[in-house]
Amino acid sequence: MVYMDVNTAASKWNLSERSVRNYCNEGRIPGAVMKAGSWAIPTDAMKPARKQRAGKIPTDLLTRLRMEKESGITGGIYHKVQIELTYNSNHIEGSRLTHDETRYIFETNTIGIKDESVNVDDIVETVNHFRCIDLVIDQANYALSETFIKQLHLLLKSGTSDSRKPWFAVGDYKRLANEVGGIETTAPGEVAAAIKALLKEYNKSKNKKLEDIIDFHCRFEKIHPFQDGNGRVGRLIMFKECLRNGITPFIIEDDIKEFYYRGLKEWKREKGYLTDTVLSCQDRFKKYMEYYGLEYGD
């Protein structure tokens, strides 16, 4: 990774150094790290978008999500997305936290669990997933990059028991070969090149269609670049890319995960399985948007 200092970033983005440091402190520049008391910023980082000014309540999803996030509004679409996306994506991967427990953690920042033992990682990854969604919302308008993808994984897995294992690379690609559903995935030594090639091809087109986003997801999961957390990172990427391209997003809910898995497995041979599953999930999300007075496309 090649980095630039705050002064260079300020000149590049036509900002003051103070503004750049504030963006770093707020976590609004993916991949920015503190080195020897100074911020080091990836040279491919994008200039953070300005915050929405107060005014008329927006009816487009991304602007509303940002407004509610920054204002701390409860009970809105931001609140809904945080709980539904986090609960379902984690549950698909085996989390035992209930929907109510997930909601309680988000709403109160405390743990409301009684009379049962709970895996600490389920709690840590739930809190981390909330932060991942915030990153998705903040960086929705930027082109998809390796830096962003690795930042999602870093946020998701930080503080988990996996992060304490010497062979587990938090925020970086896998070191050991793995399988998904009994199917071989890309070898560790080939992952970086495979992801770069996938991103290069995906980012050629500026106007993405739903099929492009689904196709990226299937190919990303086939590479399976991380030791763990690939499904959740992949689904977060799909949500981000829908926001970026003005496509109604969707949440793969736990009750249809078998259809989702079948669609992933059969995508290369038959695209209809996963496409139909995603369209069904989109219909569910449109109902959320209708309830909150938000506009959506076809």
Image (cartoon, rainbow, N blue to C red):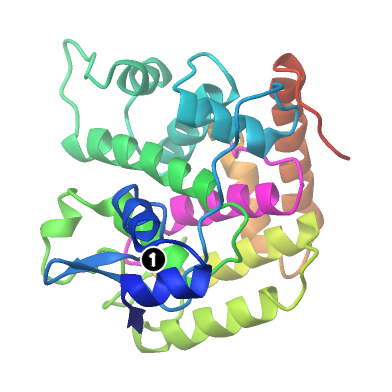
Residue 164 spot, x, y in % from top left: 11, 58
Q: Is residue 23 above or below residue 99?
A: below
| Magenta stretch in the rendered image | 226-252
- Report the front residue among 61 and 114: 61
- Please say whether residue 173 is visible from this viewpoint: no
x and y, in percent, of residue 246 in the image:
76, 47
Identify which residue is drawn at 70% across, 30% down: 285
Amino acid marked by disc 1: Lys
Circle 1 crowding by C-alpha within 10 Å: few under 14, some 14–19, many from 20? many
- Point 77% across, 62% down: residue: 208
Q: Mark 1 points at which residue?
A: 150
Residue 78, percent across and down?
Answer: 54, 27
Is residue 240 depicted above or below 6 in this figure?
above
Against 133, residue 198 (above or below) is below
Residue 105 is inside the magenta segment: no
Q: Which residue is drawn at 60% across and 33% down?
A: 53
Can you see residue 270? Answer: yes
Q: Quadrant of the N terminus?
A: bottom left
Answer left or right for 173 relative to 62. left
